[in-house]
Image (cartoon, rainbow, N blue to C red):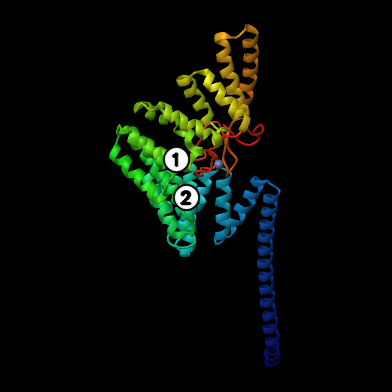
Amino acid sequence: MIQIATSWLLLLPVLFGLGWLASRWDLRLENRMDERERMRQQRSTFKGLSLLLNEQPDQAIETLVKIAQLDPETIELHFSLGNLFRRRGETERAIRVHQHLASRDDLKPRDRDHAAYELGRDFLRAGLLDRAEASLNRVGDGKYAAPAKESLLEMYQIERDWKKAIIAAAELESLQDKSHQTEIAQFHCELAQEALRRKDLSEAEQAIERALQAVPNHARSLILQGDYLVALERPAQAIEVWNMVANTHPAYMHLLADRWMAAHTAIDKADAGLDRLCELLKTQATGELLDIVQKHLTQIRGAQAAEVMLTDVMQHSPSLSALSKLAETRLALAETNGSPERIADLKATLSLLKQRTTSLVRYTCGNCGFRARRFYWQCPGCNHWEAYSPRRSEGAVPSGPSM
Ligand SMILES: [Zn+2]
């Protein structure tokens, strides 16, 4: 019996050894499984990315969602997923992903700001402006402060809440090394225009003053200041202000030429007003000003005077628009004393020229290339202010977006 017990005792170290080996084996097995899991995740990530690169976003999203579910710690992946949903127009899913991130307690302040910013962008995209504003206002100082303020500025402009836009633009200036005074002047101009429409002249005066403080000698502010003076029944003073536009921003004169003539007529100086506009045509004959001057010249001095002016313009600034106006004036003259053949000839020429000019004559945004028949202070294509050249062009047939 004792002999058996001793042999068992001798077996003990061997059993320990076997146990140790088994535990090592187990650990190695576990490690290998972890490694395999990691490899699988990595493969899934790469698969997701390659699907994205191959522009198969549906499959890419499915793959990436699986990884995010397997490992809820992957914050960056959640952000990428949320942005991907938003870009695809799936704002509800984007909101869910970003809301989940924003509600996590374990997030670093920077990631929380990031989540609040992305959530604000989602709400903005979904048109839920109140919620967008609340979320964007939650973003603290740091990396996302300026982008959040930019989004707020964009939103206030969509809402046409110019007062809030002015504050946001000023705050953005303090966050960035970039001037926003042109936008601020334009926001004050929008307020002035609204006030003039409601005949609230003291509010209009204040807004114009502030616009001119932001950008001295600002073209639109001066145009509005003239409108304000006309509303006060002070046409002579309005002309004085508009003269500053004529001297320093002559390219914008087409925006006020009709009112300029009305103000001059009100003080019995229509001739002087018309002479000044004709003088401006020496440098501004390619734009809309020519149409307006031709109209007033015909009304005040007759078609003959308009023909002389247009012949002169065709000498120094030839354009299809000027040629079309010349044909129009000659047709008016022929209709009173011309032969039926000449009238028919001029009508054919005019209809051809009008076809060409209506399809070609456009204002073009210098920022995004958007082309439009009328002038805009803010581009409807890219929302940039003062991006349109006030000079209308007769470029080639538009290839980009236009209206
Ligand atoms: Zn544009």
Query: Which residue, given by chain and number where applicable, does mark 2 sit on?
Result: 151
- Using the image, determine if residue 156 lies above or below residue 258: below
**In what quadrant does ligand 1 lie?**
top right
Classify the position of the C terminus by image quarter.
top right
Q: Nearer the viewer, mark 1 or mark 2?
A: 1
- In the picture of the structure, the residue carrying the numbered disc 1 is 245
> What crowding class fits label 1: few (fewer than 14 Cα within 10 Å), some (14-19), or many (20 or more)?
many
For the residue pair 106 and 372, the one nearer the viewer reads as 372
At label 2, which amino acid type do we have?
Answer: Ser
Q: Residue at coordinates 49% horizontally, 61% vertically from top-left?
A: 143
Q: Nearer the viewer, residue 231 or 346?
A: 346
Give the quadrant of residue 78. bottom right
Q: Position of residue 361 (x, y in %)?
A: 59, 30
Say if 40 sits above or below 271 in the image: below
**Residue at 56 percent of width and 10 percent of height:** 335
Q: Earlier in the sequence, mark 1 or mark 2?
A: 2
Structural distance between the alpha carbons of marks 1 and 2: 34 Å
- Residue 174 in which image quadrant: bottom left
Q: Quadrant of the N terminus?
A: bottom right
Q: Is residue 274 left or right of residue 339?
A: left
- Can residue 159 be seen in this snapshot? no
